[in-house]
Amino acid sequence: MTVQQIIDRTEGDLVQEEDQFTALCYAVITRFDLDGCSRLVSERCAHCRSLVREPNGTCGKFDCPGQTAPDARESFFDIAVDVTDHTGTLTGCRMVSRVAETVLCCDVATFLRQTDTQRTVLKWKYLLDRCAVRLIVKRRSAVRFQHLYSIVDCAIADPAEVEAKLKVY
């Protein structure tokens, strides 16, 4: 799908029938702020997997054992990425956990030990290069006021594959 097709489907009636859909988009990553000031790592409770919102905080769930154990947190990648093709841009796509580890070829602890120069090198492996980006698109809900674009796979695209499958729409 192109970016415009994804946007049309999220704004149209089709999404009313289902909570989510998947898409393969051949696009360029236009925001991948690994060496800037964007948040790249978040924490979750090791017991219930809920997001821990406060730095060095505890789990916010009332009945979770992690509420009294501040050391029961685990870090995970939570990177905002913009994906652009010839039809538009999807802003704020999320690249988390395993996908980010695969793309960056390292885990969170290794990444946090890297210098800005090393992070810049990592960023430029993907930034402004045509990628095959697989997304899960979740529709808006009462809790989430905007669509969620979650990247489930990202790899540098083979130019022959892009040429054969790129939509003009």
Image (tube, rainbow, N blue to C red):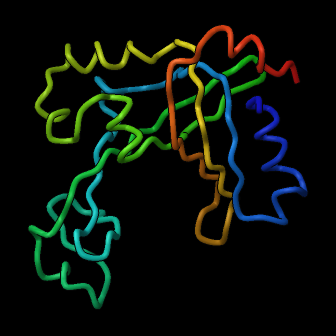
| Quadrant in the picture for residue 47 | bottom left
Identity of the residue drawn at 67% across and 35% down: 24
| Quadrant of the drawing holding the C terminus | top right
Coordinates of residue 123 in the picture (x, y in percent)? 36, 19
Coordinates of residue 36 in the picture (x, y in percent)? 31, 25
| Quadrant of the drawing holding the N terminus | top right
Horizontal arrangement in the rendering, residue 24 relative to residue 13 (left or right): left
| Quadrant in the picture for residue 34 | top left
Identity of the residue drawn at 84% across and 42% down: 8
Horizontal arrangement in the rendering, residue 50 relative to residue 115 (left or right): right
Position of 8 relative to 33 (above/below): below
Coordinates of residue 104 in the picture (x, y in percent)? 32, 28
Position of 108 relative to 113 (above/below): below
Taking depth in this image into account, of 169 and 134 the one nearest to the observer is: 134
Q: How many marks?
A: 0
Position of 150 relative to 160 (above/below): below
Identity of the residue drawn at 20% across and 33% down: 111
Coordinates of residue 71 in the picture (x, y in percent)? 9, 67
Identity of the residue drawn at 64% across and 34% down: 90
Q: Residue furthest bottom?
A: 63
Horizontal arrangement in the rendering, residue 109 relative to residue 164 (left or right): left
